[in-house]
Image (cartoon, grey):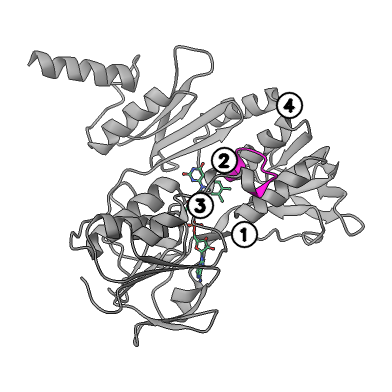
């Protein structure tokens, strides 16, 4: 597909970058324009929560240098967000006032943090982490904060808790549900993860609600159902919501994300695609539609749409996988686990290694590992190939060992 108006991408993050880099790598020669609301070159977010960042120049997170876009004739409009779509006229309207036509539009607008719904959330010293600018604000605050309260025991909260510990702060994580990472990690694995955090000096209060934040202009206290906590810095990470309002206002189907088909086209308008955190899509590894917030998903979906627009359509079926570095702990997840799956824990060959295998109808569907990258990779290879693995086959062994045994059997055959 090549014509005068070309491809317009809304959002210069991980997924938007993947679309435009793949378009050019796949030989697409039409105009390519990216509208990026942030003033920064497209960058990766994972490093933002794994280290304290204090100096803009010290944060090397951009995906590629500016020359990459210039050399490939990609028109990158930094700091100019799209404020409205007109699918009938096939144009977008930008904050700077330009009306720009497209042949195909890709929404890659990501997600925003869920706001903290308690009194005092607006006090100085209360932050959420999503952008590079947020990371710098929190990093600077960590240079002086002695008492840090993290609200939300999810990935970003736990990563930041360890970053704050490494800076010498006293850290309390306050989590509303009865366990950490309650949506992402199995109940079987969670106690080990919690033990590690507690051993690293993080105080964890689960089943605890925050009622209010108090202070004289700046946060000083966090009022919870388990008592009052002193706080010089509060960071909250209580989930994200997709940035799907442009699509909704333009009349495209939206249901906690832009609803797309198996090729990631809007189910309302095939000239619009959505990728990354803002897209709700069918997936062979899920029961029904899912919206995934991960780097893998953003990259693979962007690449799929880039290849389709360059002439090679395909169905989205990449295996979902994820990682989170929480101090000394490397948590990795391959596949999608459902709450009703049966989970079995297996210890690795050293004390800090652990895997949780999730089975559905006696078939391995997901694997969570702690500090065991080789087992994570073995899981990805097996799940990607859709090679069935039963609970009986995994009794008393690991995926790495099973994969080696299967390879040896193939060589013998
Ligand atoms: C702190 C943090 C740590 C993370 N760590 C991990 C990790 O360890 N592992 C992992 O797999 N995932 C991690 N993630 C998740 C991962 O970064 C996201 O899933 C991924 O960035 C999604 O890519 P995206 O392009 O969909 O969205 P984003 O990367 O968020 O990019 C969307 C961009 O679109 C822009 N935008 C929005 N609306 C408009 C508009 N109207 N006009 C123009 N631009 C617009 C936004 O400003 C933003 O820059 C982390 C996320 C965060 C916030």
Q: Which residue is mark 1?
A: 114
Residue found 34% across the figure and 49% down from its top: 286
Quarter location, residue 251 = bottom left
Label 2 within 8 A of ligand 1 by Cβ: no
Percent coordinates x, y for residue 109 in the rendering: 47, 64
Residue matched to label 3: 43
- The mark lying in front, picked from 3 and 2, is 3
In terms of secondary structure, where does tag 3 sit? loop
Q: Is residue 229 left or right of residue 379?
A: right
Q: Which residue is mark 2?
A: 181
Q: The C terminus is located in which quarter?
A: top left
Magenta stretch: dominant secondary structure? loop
Q: Is residue 255 above or below residue 100?
A: above
Pair 1/2: label in front: 1
Position of residue 61 in the picture relative to residue 288 (left or right): right
Residue pushed farthest bottom?
Answer: 89
Question: Which image quarter is the N terminus in?
Answer: bottom left
């Amino acid at each position: 597909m090549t014509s005068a108006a070309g491809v317009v991408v809304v959002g210069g993050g991980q997924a938007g970058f993947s679309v435009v880099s793949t378009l050019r790598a796949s030989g697409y020669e039409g105009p390519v324009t990216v509208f990026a609301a942030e003033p920064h070159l497209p960058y990766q977010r994972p490093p933002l929560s794994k280290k304290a960042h204090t100096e803009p120049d010290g944060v090397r997170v951009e995906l590629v240098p500016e020359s990459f876009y210039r050399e490939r004739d990609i028109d990158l409009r930094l700091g100019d967000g799209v404020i409205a779509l007109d699918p009938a006229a096939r144009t977008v309207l930008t904050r700077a006032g330009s009306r720009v036509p497209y042949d195909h539009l890709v929404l890659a607008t990501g997600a925003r943090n869920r706001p903290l719904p308690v009194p005092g959330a607006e006090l100085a010293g209360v932050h959420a982490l999503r952008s590079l600018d947020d990371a710098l604000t929190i990093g600077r605050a960590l240079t002086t904060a002695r008492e840090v309260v993290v609200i939300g025991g999810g990935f970003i909260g736990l990563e930041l808790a360890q970053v704050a510990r490494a800076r010498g702060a006293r850290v309390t994580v306050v989590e509303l549900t009865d366990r950490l990472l309650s949506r992402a990690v199995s109940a079987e694995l969670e106690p080990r993860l919690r033990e590690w955090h507690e051993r690293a000096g993080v105080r964890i209060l689960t089943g605890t609600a925050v009622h209010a934040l108090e202070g004289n202009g700046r946060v000083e206290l966090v009022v919870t159902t388990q008592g009052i906590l002193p706080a010089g810095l509060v960071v909250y990470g209580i989930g994200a919501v997709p940035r799907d309002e442009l699509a909704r206002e333009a009349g495209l189907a939206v249901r906690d994300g832009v609803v797309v088909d198996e090729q990631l086209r809007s189910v309302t308008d095939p000239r619009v695609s959505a990728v990354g955190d803002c897209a709700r899509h069918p997936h062979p590894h899920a029961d029904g539609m899912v919206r995934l917030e991960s780097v893998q998903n953003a990259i693979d979906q962007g690449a799929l749409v880039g290849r389709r627009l360059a002439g090679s359509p395909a169905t989205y079926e990449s295996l979902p996988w994820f990682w989170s570095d929480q101090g000394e702990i490397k948590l990795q997840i391959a596949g999608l686990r459902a709450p009703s799956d049966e989970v079995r824990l297996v210890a690795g060959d050293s004390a800090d290694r652990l895997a949780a295998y999730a089975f559905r109808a006696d078939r391995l569907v997901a694997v969570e590992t702690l500090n065991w990258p080789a087992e994570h990779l073995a899981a990805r290879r097996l799940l990607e190939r859709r090679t069935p693995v039963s609970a009986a086959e995994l009794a008393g062994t690991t995926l790495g060992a099973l994969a080696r045994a299967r390879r040896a059997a193939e060589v013998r055959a």
